[in-house]
Amino acid sequence: MLPYTLVIQHAAQVLTLAGGPPDRPLAGPDLHHWTIIERGYVACQGDKIVAVGPMDELNLACITPETRLVDATGCVVMPGLVECHTHLVFGGNRAHEFERKLRGESYLDILASGGGILSTVRATRAASEDELLANALHHLDGFRRYGVTTLEAKSGYGLDRDTELRLVRVAREAGRRQPVRVVPTFLGAHVVPPEFKEAGPRAYVDFILREVLSDLKGEAAYVDIFCEEGAFPLEVARYFLEQAHKMGFGLKIHAEQLHDLGGCEMAAELGAASVDHCDYLTPAAAARIAQRSQGRTVAVLLPLVPLFLRQEKYAPGRAFIDNGLPVAVSTDFNPGSCPSKNLWLALSVACLKMGFTPQEAVAAATLNAAWAIGHAADCGSLEPGKRADILVLNVGSVAEIPYWLGENPVREVVLGGAMQ
Ligand code: NIG
Ligand code: FE
C-alpha cells in the first residue's frame, strides 16, 4: 500500500456526499440521505482521495513521517464547493445602476434603456485581455477563500465574435494560472447586441451558430442562452439549442428568471444538463422536467439574484425537491444581478427563502453542482478516486453551515491534494 501524503483527521463530522445513485444527481429524499461520518478522517495520495471513514478505521500503516497530518477536531470536513453558474469575466462594474435600482427602476427597464448587460458589454469590449484576466484572477482568488474549488465561467459580455472568444480564452487562462478549476461555458446568446438590433434575435443566433461555435470545439463543453423578455424568445432559444446540440455541445439555459416563458421545460426536453434561475418555474412543470429527463436535468437555483434585484419571488425550491427535481445552488456571480461571491450566503438564503434543509443546501453546492457542469466523476463528494478538493470548516455540524448568516466558515482549503 502506498503511503498517504495528507490525512485530515479527528473531524467532528465528515460530510461525504456519498451513498446516492452513481449515474445521476441527488433528488428527493436522497438529497439529505447521504453519508455523514462522525469523528472521521479523509486520506489522500497526491491529488486524489484514497480513503474516507471513521477514525477507528484509519490505516496507521499508511502514515509515514512524510504524511501531512491536519487536525480537524471540532470541525466539519466536506468537499470543496462547486460553483456551477458564474459570469466570471467582465469589465467594469455597475455600482451606478445599483443606485438607479434603489430608486425603483427594474432590471429589465435598465436593460431596455441600453444599460444593464449592455453597459457591461461596452466596458468588456473596451477592456484589454490583460485587464480581463487580472479581474478574473482577482475574483477567483476571492472564490478560493470561500472554499470554491471548481467554478463554471460563462462568456456573454462580448456579443461579437472576437470578444466572446476572448472571454472563453481568458476563463481558460485564468484556470491555468491558479489552482481553482475553471469550466468555461459559452453564453454568446446573452442578449441581442446593438449591431443586431434591427436584424433581431434569430439573425444574431444564426451568426453565432455560423461564425463562432465552430471555433469553440474543445474550448467550451456547454452553450447557454438567456430566454426572457428583452433577451431571446422561446422559439429562438429552442432553435439555437437544437442546432448547438447537433454540433456536439451540452446545453444550458437561463430561463423563468422574470417570467414564465416555458424555457426550462423546452431545454430539458432537448437534454439540457441544467436549467438555471427557475424563479417563475411552477412545481407542476418541475415535476414534468424531473420525469421526462429521468432526473438528469438539474435546476440551478440562484437565491442571491432575487435578493439583489429586490424581487419578492424566489424559486419554490422545496416544491421542486418534493417533486423529484434535482437542484443545485450557485451565486450567479456577475456585475448586474449578483455581485457576490459568497456561496455560503446563497446557501443560507436557499434555506430561508426556498425551503432547503442544511443537508440539501450542502448537496446543492457540491455534488449536484458538479452534475450540472458535467464534473460529477471527479469532484463534488469525498470518495476514493475523486480529486482531493477538501474543506475544513470552523463549524461543528452540518446544521451550522447555513446558520452563521454571511460568514465564511472556511478554515482550510485543500485543492488537488495541496493545502492552500
Ligand atoms: O444570470 N439573467 C441574465 N444574465 C445574468 C445577469 C447578467 C447581468 O445583469 O450582467 C444573470 O442574472
Ligand atoms: Fe447567470
Image: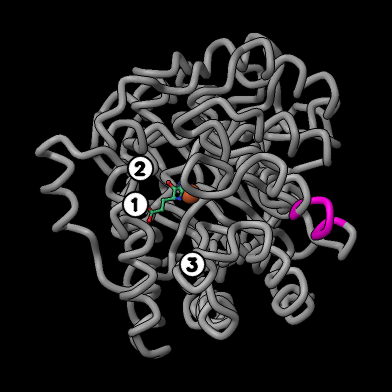
- Label 3: how many Cα within 10 Å (few below 14, some 14–19, many 20+): many
- Residue 55: quadrant of the picture: top right
Foreground pick, 17 / 200: 200
Q: Are marks 2 and 1 in contact (CB under 8 Å)?
A: yes
Q: Earlier in the sequence, mark 3 or mark 2?
A: 2
Q: Which residue is mark 1?
A: 111
* Residue 93, image x, y percentages: 24, 65
Checking the image for residue 392, the label placed there is none
**In the rendered structure, which amino acid carries the disc numbered 1?**
Leu
SS assignment at label 1: helix
Foreground pick, 142 / 239: 239
Question: Is 271 left, or right, of 348 in this rendering?
Answer: right
C-alpha separation, residue under disc 1 versus residue under disc 3? 12 Å
C-alpha separation, residue under disc 2 versus residue under disc 1? 5 Å
**In the rendered structure, which amino acid carries the disc numbered 3?**
Pro
Instruction: Say if disc 1 is inside 8 Å of ligand 1.
Output: yes
Q: Give the residue at x 66% y 24%.
A: 34
Q: Which residue is mark 3?
A: 193
Q: Give the residue at x 70% y 27%.
A: 26
